[in-house]
Image (tube, grey):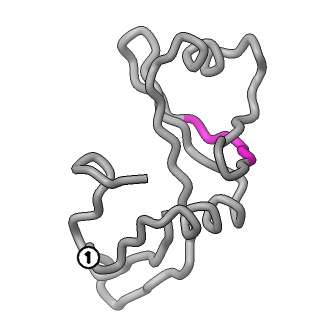
Amino acid sequence: MGSNIKNKVIRYSSRAIYDKDSLLELLNRNFVCNVGFIDDGVPYIIPMTYVNDENFIYLHGSPEGRLINILKDGSLVTISVMELNGIVLAKKIRYNSINYSS
């Protein structure tokens, strides 16, 4: 599982972890992901439930659904899992933030 420019953390890169075991731990602690895909030139992002093993992520969906048909065609999709670890509240709204793993 190598990293390249498309999946490498730039800002606060010292916080990034790329090993497979850490990824599997994150995936095992969660069950909701956002799936991004393009259908007929239009981008979509939809929340879905998932389950994973060490080799595959299984998405919940109808065998006749749009996303499953897009996957069958071999089109690229993206899957994002975000685990909220904390909320940082400040006196000024521009300093509010969240701590998360993804």
Mark 1: which amino acid? Tyr
Label 1 secondary element? loop
> Does 90 sit left or right of 94 as displayed?
right
In the image, what residue occupies the spot 32% across and 78% down?
93
Asked whether residue 49 is drawn in magenta, I would say yes
Choose top left, top right, bottom left or bottom right for residue 61.
Answer: top right
Please tell me how many numbered marks the rendered image carries: 1
Could you tell me residue 89's position as x and y percent?
43, 86
Could you tell me residue 26's position as x and y percent?
61, 65
Q: Main secondary structure of the magenta part?
A: strand
Q: Is residue 38 above or below residue 24?
A: above
Asked whether residue 20 is drawn in magenta, I would say no
In the image, what residue occupies the spot 54% across and 60% down?
82
Between residue 25 and residue 48, name the one nearer to us: 25
Region rendered in magenta: 46-51
Could you tell me residue 28's position as x and y percent?
71, 62
Q: Is residue 33 above or below residue 72?
A: below
> Does 56 sit left or right of 16 as displayed?
right
| Residue beneath disc 1 | 12
In the image, what residue occupies the spot 44% across and 85% down?
88
Circle 1 residues within 10 Å: few <14, some 14–19, many ≥20? few
